[in-house]
């Protein structure tokens, strides 16, 4: 294994650009990359670019129209930000369920995006807030809306020479916002179902985690909400869920349970609460 | 109150567990395991990318003695010899100085197995080609008979039936299994994490064909056991010893969590069928109970687990006609083994859940149902043991109801449930018991021996093979010895459990340490006092003076187990006094069920028990709270998932145990009716708390939701399926 | 495998250690620096037995590559003041002790940062330290007893 220790962001980008295929792996908090590390021989043979000491990556920053999370912004950084708790509360809700303080202190939002787990906790709320991924390489900058960032299971719109340097979240008033994580226990378990739902002038956003090979928006459910469709029971939602997502049986849950829990949560927490409103 | 004696060493990180011990010039050891649940090993292929000359390789041919891990039956090999009976069965051992290279080497060995049809579901009768043990894979069949069950059932006004299932449970001691073997002169010295140094010694004697004078087993501070370090450490000790003998240097084997969860024992899965005859107002007339347990691929301790399971199966109730039929069957699962409760949690879950099913069927209040049937002094258990301990079992229930505000809360819950759109609340009760010490003649057979010695510095030393694994043995033994001799706790030393220094006071299992072994501490103190020439009343300064005067002579007091005179057990008929004493308990769980997700949250828990005498309140309370939390996990979230005989969720990310945020504050109360033959009147406590939570919680869920759950863990997936 | 020289502040003292690039902080502490307080309970950041402080925040040292601590501050259980741990001892916060070093590091962090209790409960903050012995009551009560009087109580 080799580790490259860049001193500046520019150097990091150059290292990424210079790495032969399959490319170097940027590492920040390590909370995904180091899981069961001693057994992951294949990954010991790769090249890593350590971002953790870069002082010139953007920090968490509020601008007039956006909250910008930097490449190294952690869950804990957001949890401790009082303005985020007021304006974009789902960020902190999700961050507090990613894992315990030990994970919150190290795990980064950018890492959550590029790790591309279909069960990620940070990604659904970012997507429900219309976050934009800011990528940089020696060739320049590129911005991609998060809801177009995933092409398939663990497949991203990111070239190996690109680094996620920031995540831009627009500031806007929300009439409705909710994050629900269904896990095997209350605290820090990987999601069986994750749901982030928002409503703003931009419309409804319904984002599901652990329901498909990638985290994704649910256009059918969003349409029902836009139309103010009359939903009388969770069962009414099941056919729409079946079109929007494709849950599977795995070691954590079953496809049937996932669909039913999603329907019930949506029904009680979203459709019933927004009746006539 | 005496604080845990080794507590500050643990809190400051100074306590040295096996992987923390300084060790020079050693090799790491690892295990190559079977990839298949059943078959013949046709080849072992060593990958080309590894320089095998740098590795120590051990297989079954390297055993100096019989290829057997000595236990009840001599059926389990140390290393598979041509045949494998379960996934992860050890086939080869490797050692190397570098741990990473060793890990890669293990991956580079391919064990080729010609598969044979495995038996993987203990509930299904085996097909002929799956039979591997006797005529039907039944490895143990036990029966308890009292009265005439068939006639009583035929005559009963009401008969209620039910089938209940419990899943495997992983111990999740926080310190994984670990062992160091080294050669000191001609002696093989084992240091490691274990509950029973003398079990390890016996297994080494056998497999290494080496007499005890050339073997020494030392327990290192042990980071939790819960039964998981009862019989399993014998395997690891033999493995480490074989590698060390071949390498001629120390070998350290430390399992990582994945290997520990996949390859070591777990709680036996069980299915229990009840057929119960009752009067219309709920008096028990007949109990017909069938118990079926999955033993896994080798016998291990399954016969004894089954025994304790069936003895507890009828619950703490008086009934004149009882038949309990228990079978443990052989499958090709990784062998199941000792786990806190030892068969009783499975059968008591069934019994106590069934009591609530009966209550609902009959329209009787579940508290009333228990009150009228709880055993009273002078009545007998299923084995015919007449209970005369003076414990007030109804008072135990009353205290639990009072502490939990049973009546008030049930009214409040009814109001909540009538209006809340997505949550339901409920309360559940379980009343139960647990026998302390080995079953029947077990303690007589063990002939436990313990010493209390005067040291040169004027202190006394308790020499016992019973180990500290968190339950508090060091502190409790200190207290018992100090109290008995009138000394300060600092004047008592607890010897390291080293088979070269301490006599065999039996294994640290079966809730026996305080009650049975603690009593030996008292009697050895008495013997020491006699040998010092002191009268029975001598305490404190008189003892100190005599110890000072005698310190050159090295006076040693000793005690050997003696059966209390009134205890009689017949192992052939399974009749008689199964245990010297039972502890009695009533647990109340309050739950909130989320109808959206099927998630159950335990919002309050009250645990009341009568345990003879509380020796150290903080430790006793901690034992109960820990057992209850482990029970909450077993009841609601801890599920072993299997594929082709292998556990697929062998990670703490996917095998979920409760965190601090998943359990409520567990409220504990004790009642005391001293037991004449227990230390200071104490009865066993360690296992009792795992028996009650699962039925109390499922009874609460049943009450909250109107469903009828009969299987644990009651995961959200299972409960959701019951909602329709 | 190439070794890296990593300089950092360990329990207040400047330290330099040479470790392979693939090494985890947990292994460096335990097997290279002889600080065996932190334990490996799972190797996947679930159990918290390996908790240490990195720049003052609790982290799982099994998920930290050693090279990342260069020029940073690491504090381990070995630096804990025994007297300050008395409330945990009295409450029964330790039984088998395998989770304890990690529990102590998170507990001490909470005690040193009472302001976090304005938004979090002790039970939520301790959820990253699995304990199989105590049922958590002893730990929670011990932390509450160790908190500075009235500090940060919501």
Image: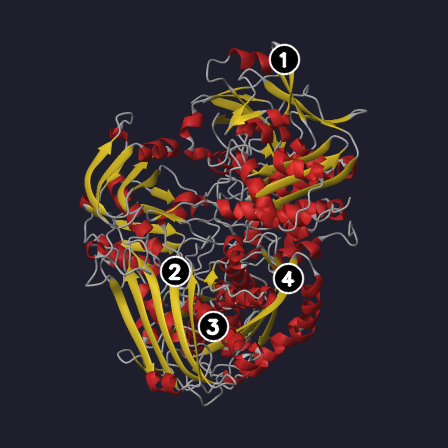
Q: Nearer the viewer, residue B142 or B255?
A: B142
**Residues under labels 3 and 4: Cα distance?**
22 Å
Judging by the rendered image, the residue that carries numbered circle 2 is: B269
**Mark 3 or mark 4: which comes first in sequence?**
3
Q: Pointer 2 and pointer 3: residues touching (CB < 8 Å)? A: no
Judging by the rendered image, the residue that carries numbered circle 4 is: B424
Judging by the rendered image, the residue that carries numbered circle 3 is: B354
Q: Nearer the viewer, residue B444 or B130?
A: B130
Q: Quadrant of residue B327?
A: bottom left
Q: Quadrant of residue A8?
A: top right
Task: Determine the chain carrying the residue at label 4.
Answer: B
Residue B250 on image: x %, y %: 33, 42
**Mark 2 or mark 3: which comes first in sequence?**
2
Q: Marks 1 and 2: which is nearer the front? A: 2
**Mark 4 or mark 2: which comes first in sequence?**
2
Q: Residues within 10 Å of mark 4 (few under 14, many from 20)?
A: many
Exactly how many numbered labels are in the figure?
4
Judging by the rendered image, the residue that carries numbered circle 1 is: A10
Examine the rendered structure and indicate whether residue A72 appears above or below residue A218.
Answer: above
Q: Quadrant of the N terminus of chain B?
A: bottom right
Q: Residue at x 61, y 44 (%)?
A: A181
Can residue C47 be spotted in the picture?
A: no
Examine the rendered structure and indicate whether residue A89 appears above or below residue B477.
Answer: above
Q: Marks 4 and 1: which is nearer the front? A: 4
Can residue A210 be spotted in the picture?
A: yes
């Amino acid at each position: 294994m080799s580790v490259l220790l860049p001193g500046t962001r520019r150097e990091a980008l150059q290292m990424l650009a210079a790495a032969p295929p399959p490319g170097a792996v940027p590492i920040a908090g390590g909370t995904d990359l180091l899981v069961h590390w001693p057994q992951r021989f294949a990954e010991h043979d790769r090249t890593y670019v350590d971002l953790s000491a870069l002082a010139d990556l953007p920090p968490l920053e509020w601008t007039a129209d956006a909250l910008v999370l930097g490449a190294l912004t952690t869950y804990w950084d957001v949890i401790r930000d009082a303005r985020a708790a007021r304006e974009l509360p789902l960020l902190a809700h999700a961050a507090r369920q990613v894992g315990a303080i030990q994970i919150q202190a190290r795990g980064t939002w950018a890492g959550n995006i590029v790790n591309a787990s279909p069960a990620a906790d940070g990604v659904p709320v970012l997507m429900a807030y219309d976050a934009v991924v800011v990528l940089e390489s020696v060739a320049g900058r590129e911005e991609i809306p998060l809801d177009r960032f995933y092409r398939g299971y663990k497949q991203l719109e990111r070239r190996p020479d690109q680094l996620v340097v920031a995540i831009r979240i627009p500031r806007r008033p929300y009439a409705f916002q909710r994050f629900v994580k269904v896990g095997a226990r209350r605290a820090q378990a990987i999601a069986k179902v994750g749901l982030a739902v928002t409503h703003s002038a931009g419309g409804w956003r319904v984002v599901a985690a652990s329901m498909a090979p990638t985290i994704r928006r649910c256009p059918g459910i969003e349409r029902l909400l836009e139309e103010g469709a009359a939903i009388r029971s969770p069962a009414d939602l099941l056919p729409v869920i079946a079109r929007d997502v494709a849950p599977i049986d795995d070691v954590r849950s079953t496809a049937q349970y996932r669909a039913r829990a999603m329907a019930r949560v949506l029904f009680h927490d979203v459709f019933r609460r927004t009746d006539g409103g | 109150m005496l604080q845990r004696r080794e507590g500050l060493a643990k809190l400051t990180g100074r306590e040295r567990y096996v992987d923390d011990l300084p060790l020079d010039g050693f090799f790491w050891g690892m295990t190559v395991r079977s990839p298949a649940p059943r078959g013949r090993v046709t080849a072992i292929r060593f990958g080309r990318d590894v320089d095998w000359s740098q590795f120590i390789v051990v297989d079954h041919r390297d055993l100096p003695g019989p290829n057997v891990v000595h236990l009840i039956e001599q059926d389990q090999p140390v290393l598979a010899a041509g045949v494998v009976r379960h996934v992860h069965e050890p086939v080869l051992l490797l050692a190397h100085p570098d741990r990473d290279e060793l890990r890669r080497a293990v991956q580079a060995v391919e064990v080729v197995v010609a598969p044979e049809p495995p038996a993987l579901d203990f509930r299904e009768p085996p097909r002929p080609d799956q039979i591997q043990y006797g005529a039907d894979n039944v490895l143990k069949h036990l029966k308890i008979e009292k009265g005439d069950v068939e006639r009583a059932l035929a005559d009963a006004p009401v008969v209620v039936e039910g089938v209940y299932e419990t899943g495997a449970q992983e111990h999740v001691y926080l310190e994984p299994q670990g062992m160091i073997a080294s050669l000191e002169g001609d002696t093989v010295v084992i240091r490691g994490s274990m509950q029973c140094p003398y079990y390890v010694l016996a297994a080494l004697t056998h497999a290494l064909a080496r007499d005890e004078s050339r073997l020494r087993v030392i327990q290192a501070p042990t980071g939790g056991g819960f039964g998981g370090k009862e019989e399993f450490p014998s395997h690891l000790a033999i493995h480490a010893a074989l590698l060390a003998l071949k390498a001629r240097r120390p070998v350290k084997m430390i399992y990582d969590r994945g290997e520990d969860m996949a390859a070591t024992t777990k709680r036996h899965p069980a299915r229990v069928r009840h057929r119960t005859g009752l009067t219309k107002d709920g008096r028990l007339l007949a109990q017909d109970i069938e118990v079926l347990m999955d033993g896994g691929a080798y016998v291990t301790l399954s016969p004894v687990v089954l025994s304790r399971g069936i003895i507890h199966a009828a619950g703490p109730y008086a009934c004149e006609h009882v038949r309990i039929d228990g079978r443990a069957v052989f499958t090709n699962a990784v062998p199941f083994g000792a786990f806190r409760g030892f068969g009783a949690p499975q059968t008591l879950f069934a019994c106590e859940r069934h009591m609530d099913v009966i209550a609902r069927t009959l329209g009787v209040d579940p508290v009333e149902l228990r009150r009228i049937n709880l055993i009273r002094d002078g009545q007998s258990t299923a084995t015919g043991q007449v209970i005369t301990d003076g414990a007030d079992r109804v008072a135990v229930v009353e205290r639990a109801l009072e502490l939990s505000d049973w009546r008030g809360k049930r009214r409040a819950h009814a109001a909540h449930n009538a209006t809340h759109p997505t949550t339901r609340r409920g309360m559940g009760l379980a009343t139960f018991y647990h026998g302390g010490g080995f079953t029947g003649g077990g303690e007589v057979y063990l002939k436990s021996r313990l010493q209390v010695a005067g040291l040169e510095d004027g202190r006394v030393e308790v020499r016992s093979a019973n180990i500290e694994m968190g339950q508090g043995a060091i502190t409790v033994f200190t207290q018992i010895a100090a109290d008995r001799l009138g000394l300060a706790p600092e004047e008592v030393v607890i010897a390291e459990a080293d088979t070269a220094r301490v006599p065999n006071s039996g294994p640290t299992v079966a809730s026996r340490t305080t009650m049975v072994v603690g009593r030996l501490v008292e009697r050895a103190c008495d013997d020491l006092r006699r040998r010092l020439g002191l009268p029975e009343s001598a305490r404190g300064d008189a003892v100190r003076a005599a110890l000072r005067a005698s310190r050159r002579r090295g006076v040693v007091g000793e005690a050997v187990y003696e059966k209390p005179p009134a205890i009689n057990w017949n192992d052939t008929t399974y009749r008689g006094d199964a245990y010297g004493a039972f502890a009695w308990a009533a647990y109340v769980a309050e739950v909130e069920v989320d109808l959206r997700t099927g998630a159950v949250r335990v919002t309050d828990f009250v645990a009341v028990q009568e345990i003879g005498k509380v020796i150290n309140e903080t430790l006793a309370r901690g034992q109960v709270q820990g057992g209850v939390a482990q029970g909450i996990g077993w009841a609601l979230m801890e599920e072993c998932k299997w594929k082709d005989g292998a556990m697929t969720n062998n990670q703490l990310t996917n095998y979920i145990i409760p965190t601090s945020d998943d359990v409520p504050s567990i409220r504990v109360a004790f009642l005391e009716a001293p037991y004449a033959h227990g230390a200071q009147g104490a009865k066993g406590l360690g296992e009792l708390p795992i028996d009650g939570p699962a039925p109390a919680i499922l009874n609460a869920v049943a009450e909250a939701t109107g469903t009828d759950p009969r299987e644990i863990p009651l995961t959200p997936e299972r409960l959701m399926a019951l909602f329709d | 495998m190439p070794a890296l020289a990593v300089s950092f502040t360990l329990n207040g003292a400047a330290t330099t250690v040479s470790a392979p690039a693939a090494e985890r902080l947990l292994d460096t502490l335990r097997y290279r620096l002889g600080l065996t307080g932190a334990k490996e309970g799972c190797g996947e950041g679930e159990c918290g037995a390996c908790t240490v402080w990195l720049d003052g925040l609790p982290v799982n040292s099994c998920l930290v590559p050693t090279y990342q601590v260069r020029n940073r501050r690491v504090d381990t259980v070995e630096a804990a003041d025994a007297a300050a741990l008395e409330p945990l001892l009295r409450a029964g916060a330790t039984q088998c002790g395998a989770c304890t070093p990690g529990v102590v590091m998170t507990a001490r962090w909470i005690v040193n940062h009472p302001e976090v209790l304005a938004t979090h409960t002790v039970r939520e903050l301790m959820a990253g330290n699995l304990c199989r012995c105590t049922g958590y009551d002893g730990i929670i009560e011990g932390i509450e007893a160790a908190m500075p009087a009235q500090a940060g109580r919501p």
